[in-house]
Structure formats: C-alpha cells, structure tokens
Image (cartoon, rainbow, N blue to C red):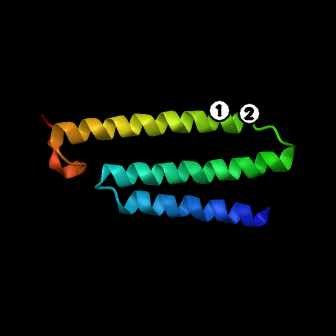
C-alpha cells in the first residue's frame, strides 16, 4: 500500500512540475492537469479499496474530471479557431 502512495505522490509532483514549466502552451497545461487528476484518482482508488470497497465517490470524481477535460478541450478548440495557435502570448488580452 505504501508504494502506491509514493507512486501517486510522485505522479502528482511530476504533474505540478510540468504544469509550472510549460505554462506557455494551453494544450500542455491541460495534459498536465489531466495527469494530476489521474494521480489523485489513483490515490483515491487505492485508499477506498483499502477501507472496504466503497467506490461511489471515485466514480463521481471521475465524472467531474471528464467534464473538466471536455471543457478545457472546448476552450482550446475555440482559442485555436480564433487565434491560430495555443500560445498565451499570441493574443492581446486588452481587445
């Protein structure tokens, strides 16, 4: 059980590192956020399996994370259609 905690913790830290280093591209930021969500889900799944097998909250969490991913992809598609790329510096915020 301890190896799963360390694995999910290092996954979480790796996702935070990529999120902070690749802040210029929206697609890479969305992928790192999904990786962070996956590490949290991994930790919750093993925590709930250790406690006795009540997986309802993990399914609700997974549903909300899928909705968050779809919303991020729709913002990405809208940004690429209007500006042509996913760089944050390519469009003027003051328009």
- 10 Å crowding of disc 2: few (<14), some (14-19), many (20+): few
Residue drawn at x 57%, y 58% as measured from the top left: 12
* Secondary element type, mark 1: helix
Q: Quadrant of the C terminus?
A: top left
Give SS at disc 2. Answer: helix
The residue drawn where x is 37% and y is 63% is 21
From the viewer's perspective, tell me whether residue 90 is left or right of residue 52.
Answer: left
> Which labelled disc corresponds to residue 44?
none
Q: Name the residue rendered at 46%, 40% in the picture.
A: 69
- Assess whether mark 1 and mark 2 are in contact (beta carbons under 8 angstroms): yes
Q: Which mark, residue 56?
A: 2
Q: Which residue is rendered at x = 69% and y = 52% of the image?
A: 43
In the displayed structure, does residue 65 sit left or right of residue 5?
left
Q: Could you say where residue 92 lies in the image, as x and y percent from the top left?
A: 14, 42
The picture places residue 31, in percent across and down from the top left corner, at: 43, 52
Q: State the CA–CA distance, disc 2 to disc 1.
A: 6 Å
Could one spot residue 28 in this view of the protein? Answer: yes
Instruction: Tell me residue 11's x, y (percent).
Output: 58, 61
Q: Is the N terminus in the top left, top right, bottom left or bottom right quadrant?
A: bottom right
Residue 93 visible to the viewer? no
- Binning the other alpha carbons within 10 Å of mark 1 as few (below 14), some (14 to 19) or many (20 upward) gives few
Q: Is residue 50 above or below residue 3?
A: above
Q: Is residue 52 above or below residue 5?
A: above
Counting from the top left corner in percent of width and height, residue 83 is at 16, 42
Total marks in image: 2
Q: Which residue is mark 1?
A: 60
Kindly give the residue lying farthest to the right in the view shown. Answer: 52
State which quadrant residue 62 falls in: top right
């Amino acid at each position: 059980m301890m190896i799963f905690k360390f694995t999910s913790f290092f996954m979480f830290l790796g996702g935070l590192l990529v999120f902070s280093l690749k802040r210029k591209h929206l697609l890479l930021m969305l992928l790192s956020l999904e990786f962070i969500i996956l590490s949290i889900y991994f930790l919750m799944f093993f925590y709930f399996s250790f406690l006795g097998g009540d997986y309802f909250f993990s399914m609700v969490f997974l549903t909300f994370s899928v909705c968050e991913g779809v919303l991020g992809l729709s913002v990405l598609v809208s940004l690429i259609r209007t500006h042509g790329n996913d760089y944050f510096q390519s469009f003027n915020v003051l328009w």
